């Protein structure tokens, strides 16, 4: 899966947007969906879960909704997703060959849970783009030895760009000691998003704090659609009793968005 389920976010969706303080008795059981499509890639997982009460301490898997009907349609395809074995609430394509998501096309999501409730949403996939000079980009970098930048062409139909750094194989990578000795307990994230709000820019400097491990590293740029952008912007700002979080799905809560992606790999050494 290409994304992380935010358990705290799912819990908060059951309590955000109220004009008065929210108590456990105000809980409303709602269907939550989360899924992203990526241009020129197969359909990835769609997560179907329910909201949790504020006093309900549960793992994300306990919130999963099983035996749902999950269908993605658009650009001549209609794909009924199946729940992944061992991953309750995760639905993915089982078609072979896989249905490939195309840029600049609109796709619809339909979800029906066992009690009959339905959730629908749609997304238009951003146009593709590419990182400039990828072929001549230096394959090896030494940690904190100078600065380096990435430039890319415009996606044209995007709402924003996100830039991130991902360590490719943590089983063979060595962690980078923190500058001040903090967070050296081996629990460093493998992926760090460091850039947002590039609406009028196609250029970034890669900060050294985004790197947590030596070894093979992917430098990633995503052009995201409005649904994806609005979700991240609100997630950072948060919903409050005065400002209700808004979602692009009908009949439930959550996000159904899309992106175009380009990346390059480097070897990071001490």
Image: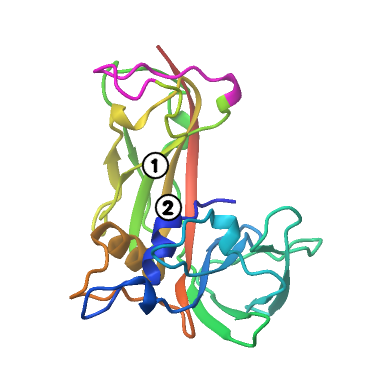
Residue that sits furthest to the top in the current view: 270
Pinpoint residue 259: horizontal percent, then vertical percent: 47, 60
100 sits to left or right of 258? right
Tell me the residue that label 1 is attached to. 164
5 sits to left or right of 23? right
- Secondary element type, mark 1: strand
Instruction: Give the total of numbered labels.
Output: 2
- Secondary element type, mark 2: strand
* Frontmost residue, 206 versus 83: 83
Pinpoint residue 240: horizontal percent, then vertical percent: 22, 69
Q: Is residue 176 magenta?
A: yes
Picture quarter containing residue 113? Answer: bottom right
2 vs 1, front mark: 1
Pinpoint residue 203: horizontal percent, then vertical percent: 28, 45
Contact between labelled residues 1 and 2, with CB atoms less than 8 Å apart: yes
Pinpoint residue 9: horizontal percent, then vertical percent: 39, 60
Tell me the residue that label 2 is attached to. 222
Residue 168 visible in the snapshot? yes
At a point 62% along the width and 57% down the height, the residue shown is 41
């Amino acid at each position: 899966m290409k994304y992380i389920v935010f358990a705290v976010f799912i819990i908060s969706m059951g309590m955000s947007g109220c004009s008065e303080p929210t108590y456990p008795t105000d809980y409303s059981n709602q269907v939550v969906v989360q899924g992203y499509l990526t241009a020129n890639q197969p359909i990835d997982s769609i997560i179907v879960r329910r909201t949790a009460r504020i006093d309900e301490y549960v793992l994300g898997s306990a919130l999963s909704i099983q035996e749902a009907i999950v269908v993605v349609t658009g650009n001549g395809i209609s794909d009924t997703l199946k729940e992944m074995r061992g991953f309750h609430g995760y639905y993915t394509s089982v078609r072979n060959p896989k249905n490939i998501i195309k840029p600049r096309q609109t796709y619809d999501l339909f979800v029906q849970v066992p009690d009959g409730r339905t959730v629908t949403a749609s997304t238009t996939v951003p146009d593709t783009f590419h990182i400039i000079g990828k072929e001549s980009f230096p394959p090896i970098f030494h940690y904190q030895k100078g600065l380096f930048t990435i430039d890319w062409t415009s996606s044209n139909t995007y709402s924003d760009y996100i830039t991130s750094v991902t360590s490719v194989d943590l089983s063979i990578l060595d962690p980078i000691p923190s500058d001040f000795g903090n967070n050296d307990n081996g629990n460093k994230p493998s992926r760090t998003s460091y850039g947002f709000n590039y609406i009028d820019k196609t250029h970034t400097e890669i900060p050294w704090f985004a790197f947590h491990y030596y070894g093979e590293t992917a430098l990633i740029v995503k052009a995201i659609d409005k649904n994806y952008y609005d979700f991240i912007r609100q997630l950072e700002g948060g919903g409050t009793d005065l400002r209700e979080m808004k979602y692009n799905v009908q009949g439930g809560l959550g996000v159904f968005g899309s992106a175009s992606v380009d990346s390059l790999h480097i070897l990071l050494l001490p």
